[in-house]
Amino acid sequence: MLSIERLSRAILQPITLAVTDGCCVAVHGTSGSGKSLFLRAVADLDPSTGEVRLDDVSREDMPASDWRRRVTYVAADSGWWTERVGDHFEAPDIAAGYLVRLGFHGNVMSWPVSRLSTGERQRLALLRAMVQNPRVLLLDEPTSALDPEATAKVESVLHEKTAAGVIIIMVTHDAAQAKRMSEQRYVMDKGSLQEASQ
Amino acid sequence: MNYIALSHWDIALAATLLSINAGLSVYYKLGTARRLLVAALRMVVQLTLVGLVLKALFATVSPWLTLLAALVMVGFAGREAMARQDRSFAGFWSYGLGTISMLMAAGVVTLFALGTQFHAEPWYDPRYAIPILGMILGNTMTGVSLAIDRLLSEADSGRARIEARLALGHPFRQAMQEPLKSAMRAGLIPTVNGMAAAGLVSLPGMMTGQILAGVDPVQAVKYQLLVMFLIAGGTALGVFCSVMIALRRLTDPRQRLRLDRLQLP
């Protein structure tokens, strides 16, 4: 259970939201409305006020790095800090098991990062976060650079995660995807999070 | 010591070399004549004043005046180091970062040199303290400003990379490993190059000055070695201090990357 109480920062109006285990929440809204800022605030990557608790433990009660391992943000633009793809993974063996399911063939783990396409980076960044077994995944447009086929593959892996109890909050511009993936849907408008009307 | 005292005419004659340069600049429309002239004038005025100040300072041998002169020097160095950066911290730390680390590094190394190699009487004799501090400070300043500039610009341009690691739960120190290494390297390169090329490519300025002033070359070399070690030690210490302070300022207790604390010039 992830509970967010009066979470607020610069342009965000206080947000209160509770997400039960295995639930997926979709957030959409125009660019600059504060969707990414919201996810970043939950991950504690920017200073914010209010309280965020996971299974009744407040994020302030644990070191920030422990919190982010449990509540992991995957940015829209992935960051890569060394040459080789595999060196970005904590458990390359576990990751390798997912590669084919995400549409990869061959030994991607030994590739240089520069060889990856934007869509490949996006999927690998998600995988990198997923194999650390977080309780909550905060996904910022996780399939924006993918074709329908690759999107379906990612969604199927994400469904498997929620079935195992992982909580997902995803920002998406794709209304159909929001319907496919989520039980709760919200709209972000000028920093204020409202329940979607349908 | 037998050295050839210079007259004002000797200096003026040397300055005419600059006018050749200025002439070329005007002819080829390089636009450097004015800056060259201003810089040369600044140098003449600054050094003449410093000469007078030092003469007065050396005559009095007062610990307080020496300390005051030292603090003024550190203050100017802090300002210069700040002015050379593309990005700096906002508020007090834009100036405080370089100044504090240089005060620490140059202070420690100068006191070390005064206490061990130079048995001056009294130990704070400005005739020794001020030139040593000046030399260490000048080099530490370059190192510190290069290191901070590199650290802050890499933190800024590498934001996606750094925050990707933070988001995965890496500690801040680890997420900053690459910018940190690169900043330390940038800060120390001038010193390392200076030591490596000394004697082969260039005769260091201080040694040349001493030889021209009639000092035995072997003695001049000893002095130069001493000064080079002091400079290298001071620069390394200053670069390390400033990078560590900057690293702390770039984050907070929740291990976030706080680029909001930076400002553009």
Image (cartoon, rainbow, N blue to C red):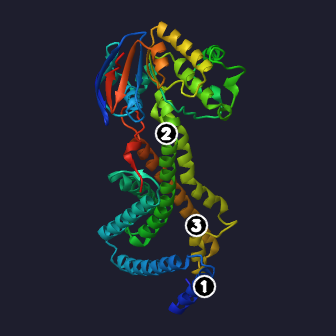
Which one is closest to the eye, mark 2 or mark 3?
Answer: 2
Determine which quarter of the picture holds residue A103: top right
Q: Which of A179 and A70 is in front in this view?
A: A179
Q: Between marks 2 and 1, how big is the CA–CA gap?
A: 47 Å
Q: Can residue B238 be seen in this view?
A: yes
Measured as percent of width and height from the top left, residue B159 is found at 49, 39
Pointers 1 and 3 within a single chain: yes
Q: Which of marks 1 and 3 is nearer the N terminus?
A: 1
Q: Which residue sits furthest front?
A: A198
- Residue B22 falls left or right of residue B199: left
Which one is closest to the eye, mark 1 or mark 3?
Answer: 1
Measured as percent of width and height from the top left, residue A104 is found at 67, 20
How many other residues sit within 10 Å of disc 3, few (<14), some (14-19) or many (≥20)? many
Give residue B23's mark. Answer: 1
Q: Which residue sits furthest right?
A: A106
Give residue B49's mark. Answer: none
Residue A102, above or below B32: above
Residue that numbered label 3 is attached to: B224
Q: Which amino acid does label 2 sit on?
A: Arg
Determine which quarter of the picture holds residue A147: top right
Residue placed at 44% from the left, 48% from the top?
B241
User: On what subunit does the disc labeled 2 rest?
Assistant: B
Q: Which of marks 2 and 3 is nearer the N terminus?
A: 2
Measured as percent of width and height from the top left, residue B103 is found at 39, 57
Residue that numbered label 2 is attached to: B159
